[in-house]
Every structure is written in structure tokens, then in C-alpha cells.
Image: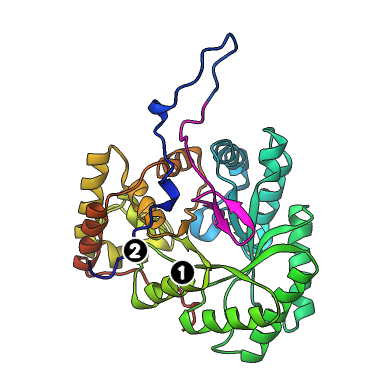
């Protein structure tokens, strides 16, 4: 099978296609089923979340994603569409937003939740996973707890679903690392967060923080790493295996490789901004993988991004593709409610191996 050997099917064992759902005759209006029905929830520690979440890195980021405040109306419509169709996991960070817009992603997310017009039960089930930056001036557990409280204030909520350490400082400030771990413990014990997680942790540090938190009576519920057909390396596979063995849920960010796995770009058709340089280096070597994605997408009557995201789900992760338009949300939602076959997974694995280029690993990820 090569190096992609896990093909979890638990998410969809109870899947019943929409055209097989029979509703009793009734004088009342027929039930309005969501277009992406059905979906089911998966667990992150004590929390029940959708098998795919949405990332909000672009909300407030002018440099990389071209955010403008005029986009807020469509962002809110995009959020509403996602929630109406069963998405209840939204990932953000206290560092998301550039310049004067620092923290804008959290502010918008809180605003959209407050102004959501749907059922109160659905609104209450929304899970926010936010990340707290390991800034050099956050040197004590108390300062890290204050960062959590600042995020709560920005979002105007009483409790965060998952509080995550954005990156490890073990490589350059190991003493600060312990203080930040203690900060996670404190915010959990104070009830500021329902669960704790980490982001950009490599295999060795992941095991260390798991054991440290366990000794303090705090379960490590999630680990967020760059994970896609484009970024599969030995470290990522090891992280996935560790998560599986310790009961940690792996959250896959950049499941579309910053857009390289959408099929929308070529060496002669590049995105604007800083991404263009990276795309220019990597895209020429991705043709075997992109070709397989297109072939499966055509056969499945899906799109290339939907196939790439579904691969992440089949690998047992929770992908969190970024969204900033209604069109993107609609397309990403089409990754739910079905699963790739074992043969298709093997085809994509082989195509990934044949593609000589790989996504550059996040510089913040530790060993």
C-alpha cells in the first residue's frame, strides 16, 4: 500500500444518500433538507464537531489573502451557509489579521455567531477553536491566560471550545515553552476553554506535551498540522500515528496546499501576492497528482478540491479548508457525504509519490 495505509470509514458507515431518504406523506410542507445532507459528528475530546471545519485565516489578512472590510457581508453569508449545512467547527487565532486588523478574524467570528438567525440550538453547538500565539512577551502562564481572556473579549463569548498553543518555542525558548504549557492547564482549569490542543507540533514535542498535560489531569484533545496530499512527509505520518495511538484528533490545515490542489492554477496562471513565488516553484512538479485528482473528480462528478478534502477525511483527520466566499463554501461542502474508495486512495497515493515537489513545511513546526 505504500505510505498512505489508513482508510477510516467510520465517518460514513451510517451514510444514506439523499435519494434514499423517504419521508412520510403529510399535509404540512415537506422538510427542507440541507443540500449537503447527510453528515455526522465526530469527537474532539468532549466536543462533537462536523467531520470538516472551516478556517478563517483570510478574515482580516490583507497581505496574503487580500482582505478588505467590504468583504464582511459576504463573509457573514458564507458563515451562515456553512452553519446551515452542518458545519460547526471554525478555526481562528489571536494573530489572524494584519496591522491594525490584528484579531479581526476572532472579532468577525464572534459577531457572526451573535447575529446568526438560525435555530438557537444550532448556534449554541458552534465550536470555536482558536490559537494563542507564543509571542516572546508571553513569558508566564498568567500572560497566556490573559491572552485567552483577550480572545474571549474579542469574540464576546464566555467559553472557547478548543484553546490551542499556536506553535512550540522548544527550539529557541524552552523555558517559555513550559510556561505556555502551564498556561494551557490554567485556562482549562479556570473553565475558559472546554478542551486544549496544539498546533505545529512535531512528533517528539507532541508526545512530551501530551505526557505533561496528562500528569496535570488535562487531556490533549487535538493537534493541528499542515496535512494534505501535497504535504505528506515522514514527520506528518508519524504525527498522525501518534495521534491515533494517544486518542488525539488531528486537525488538517491547508488541506488544499494554499490553493495548489484546487486545480485552478498553472505555472502561467498564478495567484496574486506572495503565494505566486511558492506556486511558481512547486506547481510544475505536481502534474501527476493534479492529473489523478482531475480524473477521479470527473468520474465522481465532483471537483478537484472536493476530492482533495475528502482524502483528508478518509485519512481520519478533520480538514479545515479556508473560506472567504459563498462559492468556496458551497464547493467545500461538496466534500462531505461520500468517500473515496480504497482504489482511489491508492491511486492518489501513487500520484503523490510520482510528483517530485512537496509543500514547504511550516517553519514553526518542531521535531
Query: Residue 30: which numbered mark, if any?
Result: none
Q: Quadrant of residue 99?
A: bottom right
Q: In the shown orientation, is residue 170 left or right of residue 184? A: left
Q: Residue at x 69, y 37 (%)?
A: 116
**Closer to us: 191 or 143:** 191
Q: Position of residue 185 (x, y in %)?
A: 72, 75
* Magenta residues, start to end: 33-57
* In the depicted structure, whether residue 319 falls above or below residue 334: below
The front one of 112 and 71 is 112
Residue 223: image x %, image y %?
Answer: 53, 69
* Circles 1, 2 touching at the beta carbon (< 8 Å): yes
| Residue under the point 42% across and 29% down | 18
The residue wearing badge 1 is: 244
Say whether residue 286 is magenta.
Answer: no
Residue 1 image position (x, y, % from top left): 22, 66
Q: Which residue is mark 2?
A: 6
Q: Nearest the camera: 349 or 329? A: 349
Residue 96, image x and y in percent?
A: 61, 61
Sequence-first tag of 1 and 2: 2
Amino acid at each position: 500500500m505504500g505510505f498512505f495505509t489508513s482508510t477510516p470509514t467510520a465517518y460514513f458507515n451510517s451514510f444514506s444518500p439523499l435519494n434514499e431518504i423517504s419521508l412520510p406523506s403529510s399535509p404540512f410542507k415537506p422538510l427542507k433538507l440541507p443540500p449537503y445532507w447527510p453528515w455526522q459528528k465526530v469527537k474532539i475530546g468532549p466536543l462533537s464537531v462536523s467531520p470538516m471545519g472551516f478556517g478563517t485565516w483570510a478574515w482580516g489578512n490583507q497581505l496574503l489573502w487580500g482582505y478588505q472590510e467590504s468583504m464582511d457581508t459576504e463573509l457573514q453569508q458564507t458563515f451562515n451557509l456553512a452553519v446551515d449545512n452542518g458545519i460547526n467547527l471554525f478555526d481562528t487565532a489571536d494573530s489572524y489579521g494584519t496591522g491594525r486588523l490584528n484579531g479581526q478574524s476572532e472579532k468577525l467570528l464572534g459577531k457572526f455567531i451573535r447575529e446568526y438567525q438560525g435555530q438557537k440550538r444550532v448556534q449554541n453547538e458552534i465550536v470555536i477553536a482558536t490559537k494563542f500565539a507564543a509571542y516572546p512577551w508571553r513569558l508566564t502562564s498568567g500572560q497566556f491566560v490573559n491572552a485567552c481572556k483577550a480572545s474571549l473579549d474579542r469574540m464576546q463569548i464566555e467559553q472557547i471550545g478548543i484553546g490551542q498553543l499556536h506553535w512550540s518555542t522548544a527550539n529557541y525558548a524552552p523555558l517559555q515553552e513550559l510556561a505556555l504549557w502551564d498556561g494551557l492547564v490554567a485556562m482549562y482549569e479556570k473553565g475558559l476553554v472546554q478542551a486544549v490542543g496544539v498546533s505545529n507540533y512535531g512528533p517528539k514535542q507532541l508526545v512530551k506535551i501530551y505526557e505533561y498535560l496528562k500528569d496535570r489531569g488535562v487531556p490533549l484533545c487535538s493537534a493541528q498540522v499542515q496535512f494534505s496530499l501535497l504535504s505528506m512527509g515522514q514527520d506528518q505520518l508519524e504525527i498522525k500515528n501518534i495521534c491515533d495511538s494517544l486518542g488525539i484528533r488531528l486537525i488538517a490545515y491547508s488541506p488544499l496546499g494554499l490553493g495548489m490542489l484546487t486545480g485552478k492554477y498553472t505555472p502561467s496562471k498564478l495567484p496574486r501576492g506572495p503565494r505566486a513565488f511558492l506556486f511558481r516553484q512547486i506547481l510544475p512538479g505536481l502534474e501527476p497528482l493534479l492529473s489523478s485528482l482531475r480524473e477521479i473528480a470527473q468520474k465522481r462528478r465532483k471537483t478537484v478540491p472536493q476530492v482533495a478534502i475528502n482524502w483528508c477525511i478518509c485519512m481520519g483527520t478533520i480538514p479545515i479548508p479556508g473560506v472567504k466566499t459563498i462559492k468556496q463554501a458551497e464547493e467545500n461542502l461538496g466534500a462531505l457525504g461520500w468517500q473515496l474508495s480504497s482504489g482511489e486512495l491508492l491511486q492518489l497515493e501513487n500520484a503523490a509519490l510520482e510528483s517530485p515537489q512537496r509543500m514547504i513545511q511550516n517553519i514553526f513546526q518542531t521535531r
